[in-house]
Every structure is written in structure tokens, then in C-alpha cells.
């Protein structure tokens, strides 16, 4: 089955009001070209589920978001994500704030078809008080109470991988695939952007096949977009763009989303890449050192 | 050997891991990470540590001056999802720097002031604090001991469970919560006061009990055997310099003061 699609074709399944999970982590390996596609579309009222960075920040700033289900939204080297901060402080979005591990349990519950997964995580904290939809239950096996972390089913998952073939076999050659496998498994429909398209014979190498973290029946569309994670990293191909993030922070602080969009978003990904210095510049960004 | 306040704090913070055995030591922030690394290189070589990214290391990376990750001493792959698989077993001690800490040892890194629907200042979000606090040991590192951090009431957003009887989950005892020590720029505290009250354990050289109390929004106990915080050993100082060749530790505490205070008379 040929799953190659343009970003526009692939994103056309997303309707206003849907729940969209976004892979990656903070400033790392986010499907940013797909996010920019959403920014250019007219969808709205989205519920986002993410270990968030500028993906969540931009969609909030653009007025696309009703609710964010999150454990953090951060650019790491810039601890506070500027656009998410504005959205929260103005009260313009609803939130469900979870522990990082609870979010993972919610995705796993959805992937496994469970209504919830019991955990002690969240007990005694405001995570439970601020999210009345999350119930604390009795256990049939002991006298303690437990958080019943509800499933977080996703209508659509958006993730960025290093390479894929046209049938949707995806390789992540970065040091960490984060929770991307669980986003994909929790979703009804997954769209994967990739830096490189390869022939299926590429996966015959067992070392490469070890870097495939979900199966092709979990991938519904593959969008070939070199540099598509920019300004986040796609390790080992390129690092995240510190200079761009700083400029993004300044533009959001000074003129809000409109000033960023006017300067950078463009009508399509090629005009975006021109605005940030071109694909070669993206591909030569140094990898971060911690 | 002379030492700075930052080095005194790193030395004191490294000692929280002394008797931990084989656990994952996680220091968030430059000084906490340096403290955990010093402990792994001196008092507790059984400690485990990650590269803050995706590998466990058999020897800690430097906190400054690293050019790339190619030469680091990998021990095993340790992606973020796998962290939970290990640490929810309890085999971890995290040393973290919350924005707020209250009398119960509850902490906040999520948001400050306003309402929850529209906070005055949005911070990070709760991150892994709820799980960390109920699944394994934690200690806190506070670069500036003040009433802004040690708040009078409860934290604005309670991100981690503490010794708060009114929030204790059904089936739990206070002793199930495991908060070890708090290292600040004034003192070292623990939870050995009556009913897990926060208690001053040692004062940094030249600091008084009054100064600590004046900068804390709630009542503190004082340990019977109150001492002066131990100076870093020459070995600790050598390893700090080795692990932080660019001396970023000199930029973490305002004005990088010496570890032994110069009194005003001497200063004049």
C-alpha cells in the first residue's frame, strides 16, 4: 500500500474538535512541518496531547486549541515556552495537567483498549484536584486508593521519524524515540513526516530493523519533508535551531503570533524554509550537547 | 583550600547520596547534577546516572566543556519511557530545585499566582514531580533561600506529595513519603522535626538560625545536634573542577560569594 502523501492531503483528515497527539519531546523531533500545515488550515477547537514545545505554543497562539493535555511545555534551554505561557496566563485555553508518566499510561491504556490504568502517581497532589475527570478508586486487592488514569485515545497522531518507506515502515535513528510509539498506537490515524524516503530493502538490515518502533499498520500516511522537524532537532541529521527559537520568543513577546507568522510561516513549507535560511542551513544545525 | 558558597552547597548536596547504594541519582540543574556526579565519583561509586538524554553512564559526564556525546561512557540505552520502568520501582533519588516549597515539603514547578484557569505566571507544568514524589526519594536544592521559595501557605500548585496529613492518600502513612534533605545557600535542612516538620540540620559558616527563620515563610525546628555545614574536602573540590572545567558553578549563585562568609568588620 502506498501511503506517501503531501502534507495537505495527509492533514485533510483532521477536523475541528478532534484530539491530536504530537510526538517528540520539548524542542526535539517534533513534526513541525505538519504543525505548520495545521497553522495554515482552518481547523480549530483541537485538543492537543503532547510532551510539548513550540508545537503546542504555536497552535495555542494561533487560536487552534481548546484544551491541552500536558505534563510540561518547554524548550528546555528556554525553560518557559513563550506562546504557551501567554495562552495560559490569558486563560484562553483549558488544560488537563498530568505527570509525564500518567500521560504515558493514558496513551498505553488507549493503545491496549483499556478504560484506565491504575497508578499511585498523582496521589496527594493538585493533578487530581485540578482534573476532576480523573477518578481515584478503591482496589479489589488492597486497602489503598489508586488513581485510575483514563485512556487518552487520539483521533490523529502526528510524529516525525528519520526515514520511512512508502508502506509506512518508519525508522527513528535518534538516540531516543521518546513516546512516539505510544502516540501512534493510541491513535485512530497516524501521520508520520520523515526527512528521508527509503526503499523497503533498506530495512532488511537487522540493525536498522531494530530502530523501527511500531508496525506499518499503525501508520496511515507518510509525508516526505526534509528538514521537516525544524526548528526542533531530528537527531542525528540536524540539531535544534537555538537562534530561531530565540527570535520566535522575541516575536511572540513583542507582537504575538501574527508577527511570527508574517515573518516565517509562508504559504507552504518551501517558503517557510526560505524564510529560515534554506534547507542546507537547517541540515547543518549542530546537535545539542547536554 | 578556599571554596565558594556554590562549592559548599555542591559538597553538602553530594552527601545526600552517600548511603543510597545502587540507585539512579538525578540532579536537575547544573549544581544538583554536579552534586550527584561528585557523589558518584567519591562517596558512592554504586550510583547510576544518565547523560540527561538517552543513555546510562558508567562515569558521569562533565557539566561543562563537552563537545559531543561520542566519547561518553555509555552503560545502557535509557530512553525517557524506560526511565519510568526503572524509577517507579523506587530505585532513584532525585535532587531538584522547585520554585516553591511549603511546610509539608510539597513543591511547585507548575504555575504561580492568579487562578489555575489563568495563572499569573505559567512555569513548566508538573513534569514528573507527582510520580517522583510518591515512587522514590527526593531532596531539594534552593539557590536563594527566601520566603518566595519557602512559602507561608501551601504551594500555589501542589506538584509533589509531601508530609501533609490532610492530603495523605487512603492506606498511606506519613513515613511512606521519602523526602530527605533541603540544601540552600544558608543551610541544610531535613524532615526530622516533630511530625516530619522541616528542621535545620546545619548552618553554613557565618549563618544564624535567625537569618534562616527570617527568610522562611513557616516555623522551622532546629536539630539538637545542630552543626556547621562541613567544608568540601580537597578531593571533592578537585573533582568539581574536573567535572566543570569551564567553572559554570561560579555563575549559579548571585555574586559567587565565598563559602565562609567575610564578616562586615573584616569587610570594612
Image (cartoon, coloured by chain):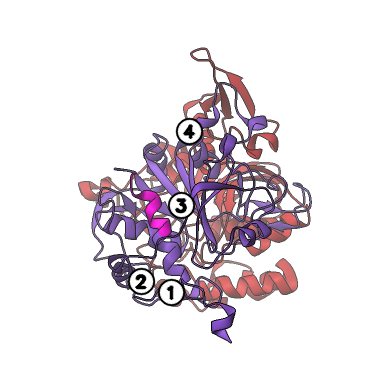
Chain colours: A red, B purple
Q: Are marks 4 and 1 on the same chain?
A: no
Q: Please, what secondary structure does the residue beneath circle 1 have?
A: helix
Q: Please, what secondary structure does the residue beneath circle 2 have?
A: loop
Give B236 or B170, whichever is nearer the viewer: B236
- Separation (CA) of disc 3 from disc 1: 18 Å
Image vertical order of residue A268 relative to residue A90, above or below: below
Find disc 3 in the rendering and name its residue: B95
The residue at 55%/30% (across/down) is B174
Q: Is residue B64 visible?
A: yes
Q: Dominant secondary structure of the magenta stretch?
A: helix
The location of residue A51, given as percent across then percent down, is: 54, 50
Find disc 2 in the rendering and name its residue: B244
Q: Is residue B141 visible?
A: no
Q: Are marks 4 and 2 on the same chain?
A: no
| Quadrant in which the N terminus of chain B appears | bottom left
Q: Residues within 10 Å of mark 1 (few under 14, many from 20)?
A: some
Is disc 3 in contact with disc 4, using a CB cutoff of under 8 Å?
A: no
- Separation (CA) of disc 1 from disc 2: 7 Å
Find disc 4 in the rendering and name its residue: A108
Give A90 or A214, whichever is nearer the viewer: A90
Is disc 1 in contact with disc 2, using a CB cutoff of under 8 Å?
A: yes
Q: Earlier in the sequence, mark 3 or mark 1?
A: 3
- Separation (CA) of disc 3 from disc 4: 28 Å
Of all chains, the one bearing label 3 is B
Find disc 1 in the rendering and name its residue: B248
Q: Residues within 10 Å of mark 3 (few under 14, many from 20)?
A: many
Of all chains, the one bearing label 2 is B
- Separation (CA) of disc 4 from disc 2: 40 Å
* The residue stretch that appears in magenta: B12-19
The location of residue A33, given as percent across then percent down, is: 54, 61
The location of residue B194, given as percent across then percent down, is: 58, 36
Q: Which mark is residue A69?
A: none
Amino acid at each position: 500500500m502506498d501511503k506517501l502523501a503531501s502534507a495537505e492531503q495527509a492533514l485533510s483528515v483532521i477536523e475541528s474538535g478532534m484530539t491530536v497527539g504530537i510526538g517528540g519531546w520539548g524542542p526535539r523531533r517534533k513534526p513541525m512541518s505538519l504543525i505548520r500545515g495545521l497553522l495554515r488550515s482552518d481547523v480549530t477547537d483541537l485538543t492537543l496531547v503532547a510532551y510539548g514545545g513550540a508545537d503546542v505554543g504555536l497552535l495555542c497562539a494561533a487560536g487552534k486549541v481548546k484544551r491541552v493535555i500536558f505534563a510540561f511545555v518547554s524548550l528546555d534551554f528556554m525553560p518557559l515556552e513563550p506562546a504557551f505561557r501567554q495562552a495560559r496566563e490569558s486563560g484562553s485555553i483549558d488544560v488537563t495537567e498530568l505527570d509525564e508518566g500518567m500521560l504515558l499510561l493514558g496513551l498505553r491504556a488507549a493503545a491496549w483498549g483499556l478504560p484506565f490504568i491504575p497508578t499511585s502517581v498523582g496521589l496527594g497532589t493538585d493533578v487530581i484536584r485540578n482534573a476532576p475527570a480523573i477518578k481515584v478508586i478503591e482496589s479489589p486487592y488492597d486497602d489503598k486508593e489508586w488513581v485510575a488514569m483514563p485512556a487518552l485515545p487520539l483521533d490523529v497522531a502526528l510524529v516525525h521519524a528519520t526515514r520511512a518507506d512508502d508502506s509506512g515502515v518508519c525508522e527513528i535513528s535518534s538516540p531516543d524515540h521518546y513516546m512516539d510509539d505510544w502516540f501512534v498506537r493510541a491513535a485512530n490515524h497516524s501521520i508520520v513526516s520523515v526527512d528521508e524516503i527509503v526503499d523497503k530493502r533498506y530495512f532488511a538490515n537487522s540493525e536498522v530493523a531494530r530502530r523501527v518502533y511500531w508496525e506499518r499498520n499503525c501508520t496511515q500516511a507518510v509525508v516526505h519533508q526534509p528538514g521537516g522537524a525544524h526548528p526542533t532537532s531530528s537527531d542525528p541529521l540536524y540539531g535544534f535551531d537555538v537562534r530561531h527559537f530565540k527570535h520566535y520568543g522575541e516575536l511572540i513577546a513583542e507582537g504575538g503570533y501574527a508577527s511570527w507568522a508574517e515573518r516565517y510561516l509562508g504559504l507552504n513549507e518551501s517558503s517557510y524554509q526560505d524564510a529560515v535560511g534554506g534547507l542546507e542551513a537547517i541540515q547543518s544545525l549542530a546537535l545539542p550537547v547536554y | 583550600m578556599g571554596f565558594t558558597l556554590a562549592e559548599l552547597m555542591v559538597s553538602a548536596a553530594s552527601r545526600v547520596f552517600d548511603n543510597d547504594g545502587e540507585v539512579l541519582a538525578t540532579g536537575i540543574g547544573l549544581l544538583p547534577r554536579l552534586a550527584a556526579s561528585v557523589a558518584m565519583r567519591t562517596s558512592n561509586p554504586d550510583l547510576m546516572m544518565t547523560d540527561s538524554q538517552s543513555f546510562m553512564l558508567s562515569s558521569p559526564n562533565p557539566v561543562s566543556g563537552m563537545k559531543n556525546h561520542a566519547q561518553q561512557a555509555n552503560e545502557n540505552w535509557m530512553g525517557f519511557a524506560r526511565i519510568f520502568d526503572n524509577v517507579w520501582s523506587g530505585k532513584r533519588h532525585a535532587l531538584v530545585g522547585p520554585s516553591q516549597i511549603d511546610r509539608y515539603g510539597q513543591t511547585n514547578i507548575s504555575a504561580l499566582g492568579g487562578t489555575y484557569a489563568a495563572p499569573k505566571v505559567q512555569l513548566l507544568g508538573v513534569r514528573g514531580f507527582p510520580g517522583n514524589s510518591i515512587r522514590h526519594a527526593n531532596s531539594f536544592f534552593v539557590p536563594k533561600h527566601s520566603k518566595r521559595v519557602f512559602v507561608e501557605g501551601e504551594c500555589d500548585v501542589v506538584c509533589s506529595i509531601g508530609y501533609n496529613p490532610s492530603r495523605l492518600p487512603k492506606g498511606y502513612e506519613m513515613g511512606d513519603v521519602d523526602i530527605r534533605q533541603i540544601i540552600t545557600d544558608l543551610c541544610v535542612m531535613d524532615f526530622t522535626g516533630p511530625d516530619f516538620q522541616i528542621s535545620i540540620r546545619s548552618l553554613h559558616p557565618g549563618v544564624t538560625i535567625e537569618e534562616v527563620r527570617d527568610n522562611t515563610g513557616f516555623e522551622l525546628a532546629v536539630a539538637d545536634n545542630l552543626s556547621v555545614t562541613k567544608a568540601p574536602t580537597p578531593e571533592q573540590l578537585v573533582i568539581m573542577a574536573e567535572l566543570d572545567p569551564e567553572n559554570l558553578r561560579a555563575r549559579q549563585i548571585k555574586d559567587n560569594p565565598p563559602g565562609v562568609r567575610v564578616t562586615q568588620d573584616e569587610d570594612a
